[in-house]
Amino acid sequence: MFFAVLFILFAIFAMTLGVPDAAFPQGDEIMHIRSIRESLDAGSYTLPVLSGLPNPYKPPLLFWMGMFFDKIFGVSYFSERLVSFLFGLGTLTLFYKLYQSISHSLKETKLATLAFAFSFLSLKFFGLLMMEGAMVFFTLLYVFLFYQSKKSKKQTYVAWGSFFVGFGYLLKGPILHIYIILFLLSYLYIKMIRVRRGHFQISYSPLREERATLLLFTLSFIIPILWVSYLYLFTSSGKELLRFFFITENMGKFYAANQSGLRIWGGWLLYTIPFTIPLIHITWITIRKTSNQKNKILATVVLVFLLFVTIFHLMPNRKDPYYVTPFIAFLFLLPALKKETWKTLILSKYNQFSIPLFYFLFVMVAILLRLPALFALSLLGIIITLGAILSLQNEKFRFYGIFLPQLLLIPMTMFLLLRPMADPDTAKQLIGIQSKEICVIAENPWTAMDIQNRIKDTKVYFALPLTYKETCPTADTLIVFRETTLTEDWKKVATWFQWKQHLNLDSNQILRALLKMDKRSFQSEITVWKRGENI
């Protein structure tokens, strides 16, 4: 029954993959999709291209898989996002097996898997063509095989784990190797360092014990060496690609800090939603209380590992919150390591009272934005959660009356709040406007890439407001995302509004706009112009 329900839920989620406007978008996805489609059009299967040149930003594994599914199912958002969806299914399978191996409780394993599957991390990155979903999979895969190796005393598992890390290199470069090295350092640190009776002791015997594991990690360099050698020896632009990727794209991020480190800490809070409070609770328990001897080392290793990767990501100049996504799964493993039940975590005072509060906020938002479906289900959520809190006799109803509404917080946000408020689909807005060449006037070339992804049969060019005459001399249609002055031979033929990405409103202006229900204050006008036509 559990797997049947999970299958139905995933089938519903899979149906949303083909919608161009994702509920939780990530700007890089536009570039990834564009690279896949340009590579297919150019026949550049080995070395993906972007804007007519070899793509220097990321290795090719994600693009190869996207091209593979586009070839099978046809070029579409669904085919390309199916890559991350399958990595998501693989991650949840690994998580289920690992949690069950640690907890030995089928019920707790199912609850933990449901919680992880409905986290913001899963519902965002397992539905976008981004490297993050695959990075979660490869990181968890190595730890899963490492655990199986220790459990069975067979080095075969860790050998395969090391080899698969090499495939992870083809996603984002050497970053996965760094993560696994930090994991192994965390394990060795806990095994080697002892503080007894106030004395600091170091034992070197774990280095001898883990010699095979450390030596087998060299298997992870096989695929990277093959790929780097291919670029260096057999491609005309290989040396320049490698120089840009390693020096500019990777080492260049350590040049100077330009983002607050709070963004990394915020990532831990953001991508664990809606189970942030229970996970903070179990993290605090793990820090304060000693584990049972069987899982004591592994629980401490997880905490040290999470601390190490956090410190590592505080070092580069960019500190995007989603950098922590490969490690969120380990927070969901902590209840198994501590032998804590999800019932205890969900029914903790702070967590259970927070859920009706969230549904109350949904009610207020639904009234403000006039969303009847969100309003009705939010009222039902308040009734159920308050009823569960007040139900002192029926423990089962108390738990599921909080847990199930908590699971639904992110799906309700996706389908009942964000979907009705989504921007109009550009492709639908351009129906009936025939054009061979479209010029997109915007601040960022990704805007033009997004239009090109939606309109496959029309050539799309990007131009800055002051350069459109030179950049697009033969275009017969303009889509203006940023206000600019056009010559008199251009006539407006269509217009729509979309949400602003950057608001230049102070708090008083925002409050007045909300009270007046004036959504235009938060939107910008997009216009379409044809050469020499009237409305």
Image (tube, grey):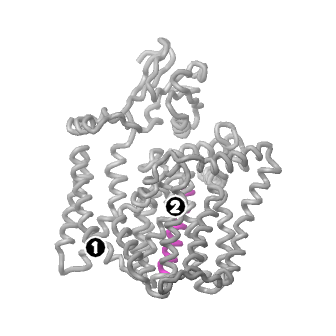
Would you call the spot at circle 1 few (<14 residues within 10 Å), some (14-19), or many (20 or more)?
some
Residue 169 visible to the viewer: yes
Q: Quadrant of residue 131?
A: bottom right
Tell me where the magenta segment starts and ends, as one range. 82-101
Residue at the (39%, 74%) spot, across then down: 111
Tell me the chief SS of the magenta region.
helix
- The amino acid beneath tag 2 is Ile
Query: What residue is shown with label 1?
Result: 348
Is 423 positioned to the left or the right of 82 in the image? left
Q: Is residue 162 left or right of residue 332?
A: right
Of 241 and 415, nearer the camera is 241
Q: Is residue 357 left or right of residue 45?
A: left
From the viewer's side, name the closer residue of 222 and 408. 222
Amino acid, disc 1? Ser
Q: Residues within 10 Å of mark 2 (few under 14, many from 20)?
A: few
**The quadrant where residue 511 appears:** top left
Return the x and y of residue 481 as percentages of the image width and height.
45, 29
Q: Secondary structure at mark 1?
A: loop
Query: Is 107 included in the stretch rendered in magenta?
Result: no
Residue 88 lies in the magenta-colored region = yes
Query: Height in image: 300 above or below 136?
Result: below
Helix, strand or loop at label 2? It is helix
State the residue at coordinates (45%, 67%): 7
Q: Where is residue 444 drawn, in percent x and y? A: 52, 34
- Mark drawn on residue 311: 2
